[in-house]
Image (cartoon, grey):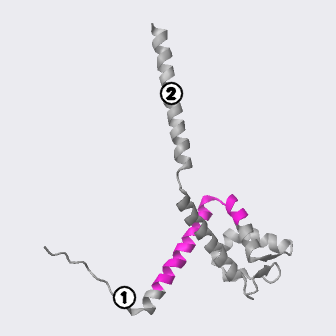
């Protein structure tokens, strides 16, 4: 009788473990839905395009290892993009905007999470600054209205 109860308890534990594993697998797959992934991709692309436009000082939609000037980049972004820039210089390559985006995608896949967060923080900072500028330039945006509820 004791062995039967032990067997049943072991069976229940296995079932619970399997259920927990299934829940973890499900939650990992559904952490981001397709809309979130699209937003993520859009922001990531905007950041990489902005970096490329900063590096493309001649506005020819092309950068190369000889003429690239990384001093225009913020220090935190410079550190993240440095492996790509070093490879560009070492191999004396030329990249178009689309090729740069593709190279950044490959770099992004192997980036630590902290660097990915830095990229998104850079986007957020840039976005906040543009909002502040638009508020200053448009006097209508300087007003704040309080809602007054009356009964």
Which residue is the extreme one toward the right?
Answer: 91
Q: Could you say whether the residue bearing mark 2 is in a helix, strand or loop?
A: helix
Identify whether 105 is placed above or below 46.
Answer: above
User: Where's residue 31, x and y in %?
Assistant: 52, 52
Instruction: Tell me what residue is drawn at x 60 percent, y 59 percent.
Output: 113
Q: Which quadrant of the view contains residue 86?
A: bottom right
Q: Which mark is residue 15?
A: 2
Q: The C terminus appears in which quarter of the rendering?
A: bottom left
Residue 144, visible in the rendered structure:
yes
Mark 2 nearby-residue class (10 Å; few <14, some 14–19, many ≥20): few
Q: The N terminus appears in which quarter of the rendering?
A: top left
Q: Is residue 19 left or right of residue 87?
A: left
Mark 1 nearby-residue class (10 Å; few <14, some 14–19, many ≥20): few
* Bounds of the magenta segment: 105-132
Identify whether 99 is placed above or below 130.
Answer: above
Q: Which quadrant of the view contains residue 57?
A: bottom right
User: Where's residue 88, x and y in %?
Assistant: 81, 73
Instruction: Tell me what residue is drawn at x 73 percent, y 83 percent.
Output: 56
Residue named by callout 1 = 142
Q: Is residue 139 left or right of residue 150?
A: right
User: Where's residue 66, x and y in %?
Assistant: 83, 81
Q: Which quadrant of the view contains residue 93?
A: bottom right
Instruction: Tell me what residue is drawn at x 47 percent, y 82 percent.
Output: 131
Residue 76, visible in the rendered structure:
no
Q: Is residue 51 magenta?
A: no
**Tags 1 and 2 in contact by the CB under 8 Å rule?**
no
User: Where's residue 37, x and y in %?
Assistant: 57, 61
Considering depth in this image, is 70 or 151 the residue closer to the camera? 151
Q: Could you say whether the residue bearing mark 1 is in a helix, strand or loop?
A: helix
The mark that comes first in sequence, 1 or 2, is: 2
């Amino acid at each position: 009788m004791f062995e039967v109860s032990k067997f049943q308890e072991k069976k229940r534990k296995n079932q619970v473990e399997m259920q927990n594993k299934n829940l973890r697998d499900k939650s990992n797959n559904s952490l981001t839905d397709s809309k979130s992934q699209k937003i993520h991709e859009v922001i990531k692309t905007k950041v990489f395009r902005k970096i490329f436009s900063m590096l493309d000082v001649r506005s020819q939609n092309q950068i190369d290892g000889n003429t690239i000037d990384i001093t225009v980049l913020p220090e935190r972004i410079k550190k993240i993009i440095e492996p790509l820039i070093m490879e560009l210089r070492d191999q004396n390559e030329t990249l178009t905007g689309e090729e740069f985006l593709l190279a950044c995608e490959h770099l992004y896949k192997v980036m630590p999470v902290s660097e990915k967060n830095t990229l998104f923080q850079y986007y957020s900072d840039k976005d906040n600054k543009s909002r502040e500028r638009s508020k200053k330039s448009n006097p209508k945006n300087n007003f704040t209205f309080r809602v007054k509820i009356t009964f």
